[in-house]
Image (tube, helix red, strand yellow):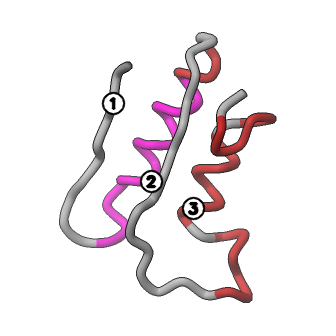
């Protein structure tokens, strides 16, 4: 199992962008993918579809977070 942990300080610097790219690449090459966002701040339940977590789910295409 290969694991990636993406971290940085600050917001809007590209952590989710990088994670989405890795998820899409791994999914496209047939590798299983599981993504989690263990800490979420500033979550707006009325705009959940724009959250980082929703973007990571969408990066897995048909598989969502589970990848498959």
Residue 54 sits in which quadrant?
Answer: bottom right
Compare residues 27 and 10 and report the one nearer the observer.
27
Please name the residue that numbered disc 3 is placed on. Answer: 53
Task: Please give the count of numbered marks on the rendered protein.
Answer: 3
Q: Nearer the viewer, mark 1 or mark 2?
A: 1
Magenta residues, dominant SS class: helix
Look at the picture and state if 15 lies above or below 26: below
Q: Which residues are magenta?
A: 11-25
Q: Are marks 1 and 2 in contact (CB under 8 Å)?
A: no
Q: Residue at 57% across / 61% down in the picture?
A: 53
Q: Residue at 48% across / 52% down in the picture?
A: 36
Q: Which secondary structure lies at badge 1?
A: loop
Compare residues 14 and 56 and report the one nearer the observer.
56
Q: Position of residue 47 (x, y in %)?
A: 70, 81
Q: CA distance from mark 1 to mark 3?
A: 18 Å
Q: Which secondary structure lies at badge 3?
A: helix
Q: Which secondary structure lies at badge 2?
A: helix
Q: Residue at 28% across / 43% down in the picture?
A: 5
Please name the residue that numbered disc 2 is placed on. Answer: 16
Instruction: Categorize mark 2 by other alpha carbons within 10 Å: few (<14), some (14-19), many (20+).
Output: some
Please name the residue that numbered disc 1 is placed on. Answer: 3
């Amino acid at each position: 199992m290969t694991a990636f942990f993406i971290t940085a300080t600050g917001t809007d610097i590209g952590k989710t962008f990088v994670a989405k790219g890795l998820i899409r690449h791994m999914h496209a090459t047939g590798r299983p993918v599981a993504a989690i966002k263990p800490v979420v701040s500033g979550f707006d339940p009325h705009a959940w579809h724009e959250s980082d977590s929703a973007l990571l789910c969408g990066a897995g295409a048909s598989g969502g977070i589970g990848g498959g």
